[in-house]
Image (tube, rainbow, N blue to C red):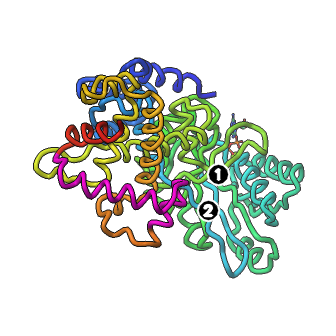
Amino acid sequence: MFEGLAKRIQNVFAPFGSKGLLKQEDIDQFLKDLRWLLIEADVSLPVVNELVERLREKLKPQTGIVSPQDYLLKTVYEELTALLGSYRPLKVNPRGISLYVLAGLQGSGKTTTAAKLGYFLKRNGKSVVLGAADPYRPAGAEQLRVLASENGLYFESFVENGKVDIAKIQSFMKKSLHDVLILDTAGRLHVETDMLQELSMINKQLNPQEVLLVVDAMLGQEAANIAKSFKEAAPVSGVILAKADGDELGGAALSVAYVSGVPILFMGTGEHIRDFEPFDPNETAAMILGIGNPKAFLRKIMDMQREMEELKPAAKGKDEKFDMNMLLEAFESISKESLIDYMARALPVNANVDPEMLEQGKNRIKRMKAIIQSMTPYERKHPEVLNASRKRRIAAGSGTTVQEVNLLLKQYGSMKKFAKNPAQLKKMLRGGLI
Ligand code: GDP
Ligand code: MG
């Protein structure tokens, strides 16, 4: 499933895999390609525009600290996740049976979804009743009854004389000792006034915990328009995306979440009763981008974020302030240099320097870096706040000793007096090494 979009979207990222730098013109080209691809993938235009605008603001040229491809993936992933909304659990009636009304067009997957949701809640320890409330399709009630009996759920029909019997539902709920009643209401082939009126009436008289709209994800962005129309007539509180196993999931999920403003709570991912899961924006964003293992990717993103934070160059110009960040940056930069580099850049008098001493120097740098990395951002900017307990914490966090932390602070103090910019600082550090 889904491979079509993921593959195509990967083509947009692929050219950046071999680049060291990311320039503004690369970003512009990337956004152009991405925009075009999303439109082709049936994501509705307002969402595409919003996404591209957000990305345009966020994406900045990169100097090769992280791979441009990872940087782009990470940023797009974050914005997609944000646009997809956030999951919340179903509301529960604290005083009795919880009522979840399912609405949607005919063929959207409503009856199947009623059973899947019931089965999901049953596996979470709830006693669930599936209630038939579609007076126009007697076969639908039978389908629901069969699904209930096949899956250990209770069944009740609330259709009397070709109408939904509201009084029967009310008295059932008053007496019931079950936890949940899921009502499968009438659908139509198109959004029609009488269907919306019926839904609005059920809602007013029964005051359900949730009105859940089942939409067919295979409709792509059209799903968003359907959700919008329903929402205008009845207080739809959540969407269930059925048939999310198709290639259109990306377009449908993004469009529904953004255009209708109703949160997506679950998705159906196949015809089997177990093919149903809480909607996870992170996982869906990962799927859209063809990221195979979202958890591993998330870890990588977190590491990257830390790296980018740590390696952020100190502000340039007259705001440039000597602090631990500048020191860390200098350490980072010289520890990447090779032995030869050290020797070449160090003062000529040190030309016959002992390589072992250099190795020791490098190790010292590693430990110094670890110390700074164990400081909070505030401590790095204001090392003067480091008292005994903070120093102990930093030493423990970096696997060093308080003495080493003190030594670093002492060095920092003397360098602060002389080094006015990163280049001078590096020179001093190199000199100190040998
Ligand atoms: P209703 O008219 O809205 O009640 O729709 P049904 O529940 O009867 O489902 C219509 C069709 O969609 C049936 O053939 C279902 O098997 C199929 N269907 C429902 N949910 C899913 C799903 O998540 N994935 C797939 N592939 N098919 C589904
Ligand atoms: Mg049905």
Q: Mark 2 is on which residue type?
A: Pro
N-term-proximal mark, 1 vs 2: 2
Q: Position of residue 332 (x, y in %)?
A: 37, 39
Q: Residue at x 72, y 78 (%)?
A: 96
Residue at 57%, 60% in the rendered image? 88
The kind of residue tagged 1 is Pro
Instruction: Give coordinates of residue 216: x percent, y percent.
Output: 59, 40
Pick the front one: 322 or 44: 322
Image quarter of residue 173 = bottom right
Residue at point 14%, 52% (across, down): 319
Residue 4 is at least partly visible in this image: yes
User: What is the tally of numbered marks visible in this picture?
Assistant: 2
- Res 32 seen here: no
**Which quarter of the image is occupied by the N terminus?**
top right
Q: Report the Cα–Cα distance between label 1 and label 2.
A: 8 Å
Crowd band around label 1 with a 10 angstrom C-alpha radius: few (<14), some (14–19), many (20+): some
On whether residue 361 falls in the magenta region, the answer is: no
Give SS at disc 1: strand
Q: Are marks 1 and 2 in contact (CB under 8 Å)?
A: yes
Figure check: 62 above or below 242: above
Pick the front one: 363 or 211 = 363
Query: What residue did someone put label 2 on?
Result: 89
Residue in view at x 73 percent, y 74 percent:
97
The residue stretch that appears in magenta = 391-420
Q: Is residue 395 left or right of residue 175?
A: left
Q: Is mark 1 within 8 Å of ligand 1?
A: no
What residue is shown with label 1? 278
